[in-house]
Structures are given as structure tokens and as C-alpha cells.
Amino acid sequence: MNTEKRVRKPVRGTTGWPEAEPVRLEFFLLSYAPHALREESIPFAVVAAWDDSADVQVVNNWQRIVALDPEADIELLTALACEIRDKVRAMDQREKMVLLMKDSWSNAIRLTPGKGYLTINPEAAVKALVSQYLL
């Protein structure tokens, strides 16, 4: 009888822990466009949703928007982003809010088409999106 313990050798490229299941994250950007006929717009928020969670991240520095439109109502944009955050986080209101944004907004606030991808860490993915689009 062999009493020697079997040692599991690590497999290259793995941690030895079970792999986390990827999560489908869908995101879109809210952009401010002061002139309806121009293509100029500046993103001011990232809206992301996955499974039963969601997050809305808003720019910390509104300087780019104020440079584009000195009369921009920053308080209104901030309040709008907070309202979206509250409604998108509530599962029963998420789809309704996204449809409202897509159907009702067309002038000063623009919504990019939703994009999706798979990620193992949605929170880190949202931070990466903020770095890419809002800084």
C-alpha cells in the first residue's frame, strides 16, 4: 500500500482556485451636447448594469463641459445622474428608466447605444470605463 501523499501540481496560467464565471456587463455613456445640430458632446457619466447590480459614475471635474458651454447647468446634470443612479439600481425600475432615456432624450443629453462585454469583476470594469471615458 502506497502511503505517499499525492501533491497536485499547479497548472500553468491558473491559480488553483475555481475560475469565476464571467458576468455580462452592459454600459452606456451619458453625454452633454449643448447644440442640438452639432456633433459635439462630452461624456459626463457611465451607466453600467449587470445581473442584479448597477452603478452610475459621474465626472468629478466639470471643467470640460463648462469650457464647451459656460451656461451649462451642472447642478441639473448632477441631479439627473443621481436620479438615474437610484432608478437603475432598483431592479423593478431599471428597464423602464433605460427605455425612458433612450426614447425621450435627444437634445442636450445624449445616450450612447448600449455596449456589453464579459467580465469577472464588474466593479473593476466600471472603474476602467470611467478612466477611459470620463477622465
Image (spheres, grey):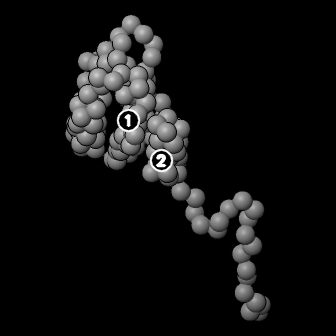
Between marks 1 and 2 in the image, the one whose residue lies nearer the viewer: 1
Residue farthest to the top? Answer: 37
Marks 1,2: beta carbons within 8 A? no
- Which of these two is toward me, 12 or 127? 127
Task: Report which residue position mark 2 lands on.
Answer: 127
Q: Place residue 98 in its image quadrant.
A: top left
Binning the other alpha carbons within 10 Å of mark 2 as few (below 14), some (14 to 19) or many (20 upward) gives few
Q: Please give left or right for residue 5 compared with residue 20 in the image.
A: right
18 lies above or below 108? below
- Secondary structure, mark 2, is helix
**97 or 38: nearer the eye?**
38
Q: Which amino acid does label 1 sit on?
A: Trp
In the displayed structure, 121 sits above or below 27; it is: below
Which residue is pictured at 46% across the width and 45% down the height?
A: 126
Quarter of the image that includes the N terminus: bottom right
Q: Position of residue 130 (x, y in %)?
A: 47, 41
> Spatial distance from mark 1 to mark 2, Cα to Cα?
18 Å
Quadrant hosting residue 90: top left
The reply to whether residue 80 is in sight is no
Q: What residue type is labelled 2?
A: Lys
Residue 79, image x, y percentages: 23, 36
N-terminal of the pair, mark 1 or mark 2, is 1
**Residue position for label 1:** 62
The residue sitting at 37% across, 35% down in the picture is 62
Is disc 1 placed on a helix, strand or loop? loop
Task: Specify the quadrant of the image occupied by residue 61.
Answer: top left
Q: Evaluate whether residue 135 shows in this view.
A: yes
For label 1, count other residues whose C-alpha is less than 10 Å away and answer few (under 14), some (14-19) or many (20+). Answer: some
Q: Which residue is drawn at 48% across and 30% down?
A: 115
